[in-house]
């Protein structure tokens, strides 16, 4: 399992908390350096992360400062922004420039669901990315997924035979859900010969800060281990997991994640039972499942859907009204 931690560049540290473009570049550089020095190589970015600047951050903090053969870089064709066939060539060219690379090690059709898959079919995005792979601009082709389990089955079955891997959400709080691929999707992908990259293993940070009642079964077994480490170990204990992405927004999070994967220990039977207890407690408190990935944005009605769900869920799960009030006021000052 050593080396399977991936650096997700969707939740980077910020100098200004409310400004997604105000990335703390010096801190990101230190994090990138530490990640590579410890033998980890996989970095994941995308066209619209950090208000369309994450790929530029990857160029400055990673590509310009490390040998090209010392890391692998993943980015994605934003199917949600494609309107006409020419958009694909334009955006792909922009991405190469923004990342400062000649090729992507991993390239995905981003956020495939029923609607975006139809767009990809209409614009023949499958032929486009296959052509880029033939040109040497892409090494490995895949897709990321946000929909229900049946849609996941359909996309793989109808996927034109070009996909080598898929990227799915998986964490112990949502494992049994059939919105997102879940455990059943992980098993199906394995049966079809696809490698699987996991995103949201800590459920947007939710599983890194558990209330005392939720973490009690975990602390009873290993009080020194962080909540985040438990979540990552749960995912890593499953077969056919190729990379586990963690969106780290501070150096201490990176340090903790590196420690988890440097000496990775699959969960024991007793530890698995403890995680299941924690999951059951969380299920009793969650109002609505949301990882804060913001793929539902922008809302045509102008509603900040993820932040509203976050406020509702945090109040229900953690019972911290003052902290929730502060979050509400930060986003809705009027």
Image (tube, helix red, strand yellow):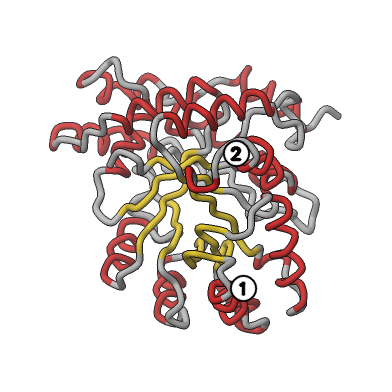
In the displayed structure, 209 sits above or below 79; it is above
Mark 2 is surrounded, within 10 Å at the Cα level, by few (under 14), some (14 to 19) or many (20 or more) other residues, namely: many
Is label 2 or label 1 in front?
2
Q: Nearer the viewer, residue 284 or 175?
A: 175
Q: Do the residues under discs 2 and 1 have CB atoms within 8 angstroms?
A: no
Give the residue pinned by disc 1.
115
Mark 1 is surrounded, within 10 Å at the Cα level, by few (under 14), some (14 to 19) or many (20 or more) other residues, namely: few
Locate residue 290, reporting x and y percent. 54, 46
Q: Nearer the viewer, residue 265 or 325?
A: 265
Q: Residue at x 29, y 21 (%)?
A: 216
Q: Residue at x 31, y 73 (%)?
A: 192
Left or right? Give the position of 20 relative to 287: right
Give the residue pinned by disc 2.
62
Left or right? Give the position of 57 relative to 159: right
Locate residue 220, reporting x and y percent. 22, 18
Tell me the element at label 1.
helix
In the displayed structure, 157 sits above or below 310; it is below
Locate residue 8, reporting x and y percent. 53, 42
Left or right? Give the position of 145 relative to 233: right
| Alpha carbon separation for disc pair 2 and 1 | 34 Å
Residue 278 lies in quadrant: top left
Tell me the element at label 2.
helix
């Amino acid at each position: 399992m050593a080396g399977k931690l991936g650096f997700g560049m969707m939740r980077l540290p910020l100098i200004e908390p409310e400004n997604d473009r105000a990335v703390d570049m010096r801190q990101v550089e230190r994090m990138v350096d530490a990640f590579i020095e410890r033998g980890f190589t996989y970095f994941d970015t995308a066209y619209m992360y950090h208000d369309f600047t994450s790929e530029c951050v990857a160029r400055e903090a990673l590509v310009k400062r490390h040998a090209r053969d010392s890391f692998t870089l993943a980015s994605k064709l934003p199917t949600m922004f494609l309107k006409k066939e020419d958009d694909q060539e334009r955006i792909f060219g922009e991405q190469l420039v923004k990342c400062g690379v000649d090729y992507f090690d991993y390239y995905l059709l981003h956020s495939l669901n029923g609607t975006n898959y139809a767009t990809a079919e209409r614009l023949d995005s499958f032929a486009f990315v296959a052509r880029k792979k033939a040109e040497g601009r892409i090494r490995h082709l895949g897709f990321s997924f946000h929909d229900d389990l049946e849609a996941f089955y359909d996309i793989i079955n109808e996927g034109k035979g070009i996909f080598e891997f898929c990227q799915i959400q998986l964490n112990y709080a949502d494992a049994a859900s059939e919105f997102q691929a879940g455990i059943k999707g992980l098993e199906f992908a394995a049966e079809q010969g696809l490698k699987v990259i996991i995103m949201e293993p800590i459920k947007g940070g939710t599983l890194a800060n558990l209330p005392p009642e939720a973490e009690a079964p975990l602390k009873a077994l290993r009080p020194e281990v962080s909540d985040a480490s438990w979540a990552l170990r749960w995912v890593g204990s499953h077969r056919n997991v190729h990379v586990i992405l963690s969106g780290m927004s501070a150096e201490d999070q990176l340090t903790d994640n590196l420690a988890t994967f440097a000496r990775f220990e699959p969960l024991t039977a007793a530890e698995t039972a403890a995680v299941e207890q924690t999951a059951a407690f969380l299920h009793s408190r969650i109002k609505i499942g949301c990882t804060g990935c913001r793929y539902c944005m922008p809302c045509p009605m102008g509603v900040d859907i993820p932040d509203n769900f976050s406020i509702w869920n945090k109040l229900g799960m953690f019972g911290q009204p003052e902290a929730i009030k502060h979050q509400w006021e930060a986003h809705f000052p009027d």
